[in-house]
Image (tube, rainbow, N blue to C red):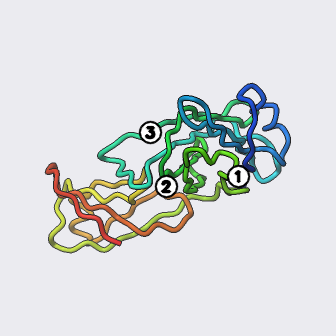
Amino acid sequence: MMNFKILNTAGIFALASIFSACTDENHAGVLTETESGTTIASIVIDGSGSPVVSARVSLLSANHVATRMAPIKTATTDKDGKYTIDSVSAGEYALQISNTEHTQSGYQTITVEDDKTDTQTLKRETTLEKNASLKLKIDSSFVKGDTLCITGTLNCIAVSEKDVKAGAVTINEIPPSEFTKITFIKGASSKTSTQN
């Protein structure tokens, strides 16, 4: 089994030099401020140091609910495992990264601040690991068509008739990380409830 990781170190580089910096492990990830926002650039590699090609990188709001909103921006790693996400405004975000088979992923939260580019850092290393699953017990108030989402991720599940009968639902392909909120969406209505 392959272990994937994303290497990151903050720095200020001219946009033209971002990718040349990415070839050196000590300068793999940068947040660079431009007139239209901050640029996030980094490399995704596997456990042996080889680049991960075609990994999907999704920039999400910290309170993202997958059934209600699309990712803010997405990127795909190139043949060298490099990606950039341009024009990111100040705010609280998460990066969710997945390999093409959706068997391994990584997750990290980031804060983009105006006028503090030189002090902003991505985590030095995020490891793409085997995805997790979460089995939740559900009670009789759940019906077919209700939805459960892990807040801040791309992970949701629609409750099926089989889930209702079993009294449990399983959310799959979860990045191995710690999450504290689950959003419950009642049927096709706009009623939502978030639980810690």
Residue situated in front as seen by the camera: 12 or 163: 12
Give the distance between the C-alpha atoms of the residues marked 3 and 2, in whole angstroms: 20 Å
The Cα–Cα distance between marks 1 and 2, rounded to whole angstroms, is 15 Å
Q: Position of residue 182 (x, y in %)?
A: 35, 64
Helix, strand or loop at mark 1: strand
Placement of the C terminus among the 4 image quadrants: bottom left
Q: In terms of depth relative to the viewer, which is nearer, 2 or 125?
A: 125
**Residue 4 placed where, x, y %?**
70, 52
At 52% across and 42% down in the image, what residue appears? 58
Amino acid type, label 2: Glu
**Counting other residues with Cα less than 10 Å from the Cα at mark 3, is it few (<14), some (14-19), or many (20 or more)?**
few
Query: Which numbered dot is residue 4?
Result: 1
- Is 84 displayed left or right of 166 in the figure? right
- The outermost residue toward the top is 16
Q: Nearer the viewer, residue 60 or 13?
A: 13
Q: Nearer the viewer, mark 1 or mark 3?
A: 3
Q: Position of residue 65 (x, y in %)?
A: 35, 51
Frontmost of labels 3 and 2 is 3
Read off the residue under disc 2: 173
Q: Which mark is residue 72?
A: 3
